[in-house]
Amino acid sequence: MTTVPTRTVAPTARGPVSTALLEILTGPEETPASGYAALSEATATAVNASQDVLADEDLQLALFLLYLLHYGPAEFVTADREWDPELLRVRTVLEAGFEAELRRRVPLPDPLPGDSAQLVDTMFAMTGGDAKPTLATWLARHPREEILSEFLVHRSIYTLREADPHSWGIARLRGRAKAALVEIQSDEYGGGRPERVHATIFAQTMRGFGLDDTPDHYLDLVPAPTLASMNLMSLFGLHRRLRGAIAGHLAAFEMTSSIPNKYYGRAFRKLGYDADVTWYYDEHVEADAVHEQIAARDLAGALAQDEPELLEDILFGAAACLYVDGLMGDHMLECWSDGRTSLRGNMPGLQTVGSEAPVAERVAL
């Protein structure tokens, strides 16, 4: 059984920028100039005033919604807004604030590697410390229904669209790097077998855990760090000038995936879930062990060799992946360790940490 594959209800605004944006997206097809002006003014004011763009609920939701126009589904949008020039101008302001914050906060190796071979060695060094990440091992030691339910809700924002942000990079690469990216993405999309598409397998995991597999069904519940993780990929993937960053992001993503997924699968099995739920994680233990070599050497390394001017951006993309996903993981772990929910609220039928909602029923597949 599969749930309805579209979200028809607009999310709830989280501040003046997302309020003004949603008024446009859900309003008349012909937006008055005053509507665009209000959104532009609210955006400029909010970006300048924000103390932490990465944790800003209003700005991250607004940026997510603007990127959503390129992905879909966004059934609540009343007109074709994908290439609305006024919205693109607003997105540019949000992106500039987001990228500036990232470049201020994301640490790069010092000294930088001097060539592609050193780049590969540096990336293995950067990701080696994440071989047994705290979140994955903690979940394996402390598996609880409500915690794993929240974990899947967080992951659903990206994973129900798994691989799509990185696929923007295919048309922007050439030669060996392009071939490596296509090889990785082919596996992500099931090698031509729709039932093996990783997003489809993850949807099965959600249904098996009693959750709704509709894209963005839980959007109102996830906090800014979760949105920032997805927005980071969209930022890198949608800009040709950041093609090095999207390659570096994917490399780090794959290089820190195999071992954590082993622990995630272990957590679900400890609660008695079978392969219907764990298949997604078991699949990634094997696949990403191969992907990490391809991503590091044939994607990132080859791109640095063919376009050495992109070497620093490749490292920036990798470091940003580790940093932003680290913020997301730290948020979950801190909340759960304190006995608090990691989500922004409760949803009927969804068990969360600290709530009194009944455990969601497992849905027969």
Image: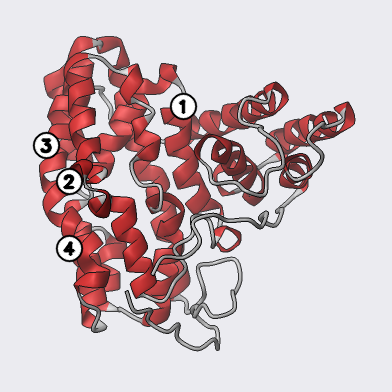
Q: Earlier in the sequence, mark 4 or mark 1?
A: 1
Pick the front one: 335 or 253: 253
Q: Quadrant of the C terminus?
A: bottom left
Residue drawn at (16%, 37%) of the image: 124
Q: Is residue 88 left or right of residue 217?
A: right
Look at the picture and state if 329 lies above or below 333. above
Circle 1 residue: 238
Look at the picture and state if 25 lies above or below 11. above
What label does residue 262 carry, if any? 4
Q: How are the colours assigned in the image?
A: secondary structure
Tell me the CA gap for discs 4 and 3: 18 Å
Q: Earlier in the sequence, mark 4 or mark 3?
A: 4
Residue drawn at (46%, 27%) of the image: 238
What label does residue 128 carry, if any? 2
SS state under label 1: loop
What label does residue 293 carry, if any? 3
Tell me the CA gap for discs 4 and 1: 31 Å
Q: Quadrant of the N terminus?
A: bottom left
Pick the front one: 233 or 114: 233
SS state under label 3: helix
What label does residue 308 carry, if any? none
The amino acid pointed to by label 1 is Leu
Tell me the CA gap for discs 2 and 4: 16 Å
Q: Earlier in the sequence, mark 3 or mark 1?
A: 1
Asked if disc 4 and disc 3 are in contact, CB closer than 8 Å, the reply is: no
